[in-house]
Amino acid sequence: NFTNNYKNELTKTRFWINIYGGIQKLLMKKEIKNFSIISDNEGGLYSSIGKYSDETIENSFQDINKIFDKTSEVSGDFLFVQMPYKGFDAAPELNIYKKDYTNFNFDRLYTKIVAANLPSIDLRTMQTDWEYYKTDHHWTAESAFKASSYVVSYLDDTYHLSLDKNSFYKNRNNYDTKVYEDALLGSAGIQVGEYYSGKDDVKIPIPCFDTSLHWEHYIQGNKTEETTGTFWEAFINESILNSPEYYNKYNAFLNGGYCENRIYNHLAKNEKKLLLITNSYGRPFVLYLSLYFKETRYLDPQPGRFDGNYLEYIETYQPDVVVVMYNDPIIDSAE
């Protein structure tokens, strides 16, 4: 009875959100919910990020520097990745409604990273049109695939790791594309309803070559879920993609793993171990990075996710490569 009542109430809530959003669309409103969601000229939905304090930027830099030092201590290779993000820079017409400080915050931190000579790459400068879901703040799986190629090229060129000597895994021709049309209503779209925003197609690059992978998810050191099989079987929650009641299909990537993820690649061409520290952008990103390594671990440092001691984790795990793609403080309580 509880389940049925919950579904009924959820259905009613969605109905009224859709009606409300549909009315705003008819009125040709570009902002909705008191400017918390703003639409660009092509219908993409955005939320703004406020200006970070100098202290927050400095704390972020110090945390990244500590991770770099610990990585060097265990003889690993380090890379800071500045991700692209769905900020107002891509739609300047939004600035008349509200100020967005996303890239301003990123620039302040990245300046410190460069000044300290920490190995780094700024994906925003790459010759790529980064794609984002119009109803969500996340990048698409296609963009995550491209990002993994840039990162591996940097690691190979800088550290001579030979992760992909013949550019096999980076070659998009070695992947098919699985498409789910009008499937995703993301974190912004679900607030305004599908009549206002429409839905996104979900397109996922899938390897044409043989893959054999094992994925595990941990919360506070306890295993909560595991899958084994091909790339698709180990990484993609097909039930989420097929469910008409589950709107945010982004959670299908990596089975929604949000805390500590461990991936074992049984067909890896080396014995190298990767540690990736990033937010939910890492869910599709790590799928493709894991193809280059024997073992990959992905930790999400956002509040309420992985809250362990990162320096101790590196000491125990002994990764060959550590990649940090995160702009907020990471290890405030690590010492």
Image: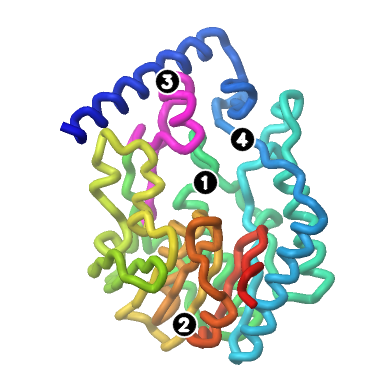
Residues shaded magenta:
181-205
Q: CA distance from mark 1 to mark 3?
A: 22 Å
Residue furthest out toward the left: 1
Q: Earlier in the sequence, mark 1 or mark 4?
A: 4
Q: Earlier in the sequence, mark 2 or mark 4?
A: 4
Camera-side residue of 316 and 175: 316
In the picture of the structure, the residue carrying the numbered disc 1 is 138
Q: CA distance from mark 3 to mark 2?
A: 46 Å
Q: CA distance from mark 1 to mark 4?
A: 12 Å
Helix, strand or loop at label 1? It is loop
Mark 3 is on which residue type? Ile
Q: Earlier in the sequence, mark 1 or mark 3?
A: 3
In the picture of the structure, the residue carrying the numbered disc 3 is 17
Q: Earlier in the sequence, mark 1 or mark 2?
A: 1
Residue 317, image x and y in percent? Answer: 48, 84
Which residue lies at the image location 77% right of the left edge and 55% below the top edge? 107
In the picture of the structure, the residue carrying the numbered disc 4 is 47
Residue 203, image x and y in percent? Answer: 39, 46
Which residue lies at the image location 58% right of the left edge and 48% below the top edge? 130
Q: CA distance from mark 4 to mark 3?
A: 18 Å
Mark 1 is on which residue type? His
